[in-house]
Image (cartoon, helix red, strand yellow):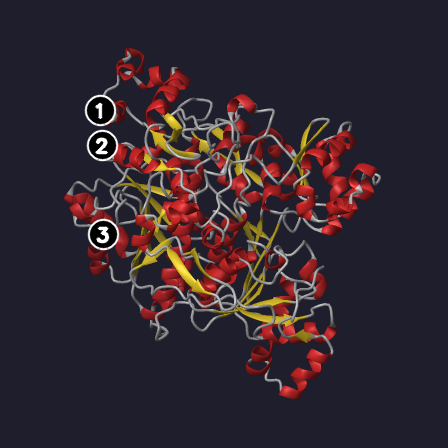
Amino acid sequence: MKPLKGMRVVDMANENGELCGRVLADLGAEVIRLEPPGGAPSRSLPPFASDGETSLYFAVRNAGKRSATVDLETEAGRTRLHGLLDDADVFVESTKPGTLAKLGLDADSLREQHPGLIVTSISDFGQDGPYADYEGSDMVGVAMGGMLHRAGIAEKPPVVIPGNLAYDVAGVCGALGSLLAFWKRLQTGRGQHIDVSAMDSVAGLSDWSLPNYSLNPNLGHRMGFGIYTLYRCADGFIRMIVLVPKHWRALKDWVGNPPELEDPKYDQFIGRLVELDKIVPVLERFFAGKKKVDIAVEAQRRGIPATPLLRPSEVLENEHTIGRGSFTTLPVGPGLDAQVPSGFLTIDDERAGPIAGPPAAGELGDAGFTNAEERASFAKLLGEATGAASDGLPLRGLRVIDCGVGAVGVEVGKFFAEFGADVIKVESSDAPDFIRVIMSSYMNPSFLSSNFNKRSFGVDLTTDRGRELMTRLLRDADVFIENSGAGTTEKLGFGPKALREINPGIVSFSSQSAGSYGPWKGWIGYGPNTHSVSGLQHLWNYPEDEEQPAGSTAVHPDHFVGRLGAMSAIAGLIRRAQTGEGSHYDVAQFEAPINLLGDLFAQESLDPGSVHPLGNASSRGAPWGCYPCAGDDEWCAVNVRSDDEWRRLRKAIGEPSWAADARFDTAAGRIAEREKLDELLGSWTAQHAPRAVMEQLQAVGVPAGIVAHPEHHMSDPQMMHRGYQKLVVQPDFESLLVEGPPFLGSDLPDIVTNPAPMLGEHTREIASQILGMSQDAIEELIEAGVIEDPPKEFKAL
């Protein structure tokens, strides 16, 4: 059973955040997509099907919804909207801030007429603040959110991630915020306004940049794929990420322990990093006659994190995506069936994704929501309020067992802890979270950012007594999180089926690099391993360099999968409130980028060989790119979407003579002369600081944004206005700024910002208070090595 069966959503998001309603529909909600007369503007967005007219952007993000036409400029249209909202739980909109207020449809007015309604507003920068009236775009959101400055190679401009990352991540964050608000509605009986910022949504993916810059205010330059090395082989490239000693030893054994690799300094990652120029040629000679998939299969057999760099056609056709059912055939337009990603996750081993194509505009006519049986059952949740915590935190009273590592599972636990849940991180000095120890200590900014507010229980799960303690913790837990290697938790006795035997009401979330089933299910890897196997690495490039990958050093999609996990777990709790039953949610990390590139894969399936790297260019207009500014490696993103915006840009920069060229008067002419236009505009931007460029162009309504790095984010006025930067005072370490949530809520208090735990810091407290153990019993287990206090010194593994 999908967890949101019976929930009703009215969806008026256009371009920005359209994925919000899609993922809620994937989880079972009934979603009505409101469109103006003539259809939604996003029906005209690229990429297009082979007919040149059918928008695959719209098709993928609106699959599974139904459509109603509403003209909000008319009294009849507003009456129609209110009629739908009378029966709805959530209203999603992405109009420019202030637009709906002019029609008497602002969030406060809507909630006054519909007291239980969750109103979710998704905008580029938030509903108020210094940037609220700025013009945005997906590229501007990626730039200002901090995901552009590290992408690409130093010799060229930063290169934007393919797809529509800012607007799609904002959509998922909108779904997460909507479900959190609905969970609180069950406690209070009241709806609220959720204010989602695309800029903040992207900033949360930028690899702990705020806390790390807080401690070490240095900025590195772009370095392409950087430390996540790609090795050339017979038919392309292979990515191997060799961070830990056991992987290095396994790799050396495989290639025959050549003398060039025997230097003892190579036993440490930093030693290898500084001499990659000596190591890479040795390994590429070994791989020269071998094919990329064969190399990956053998590397994984030896326990080495390796993945092949696949083109879009190879992603659609390889044995693993076919075996997993990563794609499904859906109608995307009249007479057009395409292969589209089959959804971000599975629920109790069943795929949760779109089961129908996009709707025809206005297909509902005057009809509204269905009177399905699921609604009657779901509506019982909306009766008497259960009561909220005194501090207003919506997740207060929940207990979460967090076995997450890295930046996936831990981010799920982080979200729960921020909003009041008791999150217990289960770990040991023999099996620590690798991010905790990556700097050869038990605390660092990255670990702190993903684990503040949690408690740490040090326990050895390889022992019978350790597993018995874990079982006792799980009996009264609400949520369990893990992202260890495939099969790890099952071997320990805590797989999904075992969990439900221990606690029938528990909601669990798992995520593995290649997923928990399929031919490559046992593959291990880190976030960047998914770049290559998902097609993201191939497309994240400059068009002229298609055969020489660029990419980024970002660990994406790790943080994004954390958002998916939190969304899934809240949905599971809503289902449990309805049925009393737990459920299990699973995300294959490599499928997250695939789903975010869904319209491009649909295009490739309809027109094989048509999808290639675009760099910063767009068929939507020109100039459209990333332009140099005054300063050290400073840039500004600028997007011109229309002839009117071009005229306004010309005026803003002083009507230089080159801008009067008649070739630039039309979009077609500017696109044809894109490279020359980029050079000319860059000659102007290079004379000004990025903020000056942004402010000068935004003053005339042209989308422009700083290519932000953490120095910008430390004092960004819009982020400060929204309270995005949060201070965590960490004893015996540092006080650091960490990333806040991507949304604000009218009935959500500020998040909790307690310190991150030292390893085993709360072992005794948890053993005594939760497990009911005596001090003598605790001492005996510590002496036996079953549980542990914080280590007195660092243990190198």
Above or below, comparing residue 562 to residue 187 in the picture: above
Q: Which residue is the site of mark 1? A: 651
Residue 90 sits in quarter: bottom left
**Numbered disc 1: secondary structure:** helix
Residue type, label 2: Val
Residue 375 sits in quarter: bottom left
Above or below, comparing residue 415 to residue 160 in the picture: below
State left or right for residue 123 relative to residue 440. Answer: left
Image quadrant occupied by the C terminus: bottom right
Task: Give the crowd class for mark 2: few <14, some 14-19, many >=20 residues within 10 Å.
Answer: some
Task: Give the crowd class for mark 3: few <14, some 14-19, many >=20 residues within 10 Å.
Answer: some
Measured as percent of width and height from the top left, residue 15 is found at 36, 38
Task: Confirm or deny contact between disc 1 and disc 2 (CB under 8 A).
Answer: yes
Q: Nearer the viewer, residue 449 or 768?
A: 449
Q: Nearer the viewer, residue 535 or 339?
A: 535
Above or below, comparing residue 312 to residue 18 in the picture: above
Look at 21% across and 46% down and name the residue there. 98
Q: How many marks?
A: 3
**Numbered disc 3: secondary structure:** helix
Measured as percent of width and height from the top left, residue 578 is found at 45, 66
The residues tagged by marks 3 and 1 sit, at their Cα atoms, a distance apart of: 43 Å
Q: Considering only order in the chain, which callout, 3 or 2, is on the residue closer to the N terminus? A: 3
On the question of residue 614 being in view, the answer is yes
Q: Which residue is the site of mark 3? A: 82
Q: Which residue is the site of mark 2? A: 700
Measured as percent of width and height from the top left, residue 113 is found at 20, 59
Look at 43% across and 26% down and name the residue there. 617
Look at 36% across and 27% down and name the residue there. 686
Residue type, label 3: His
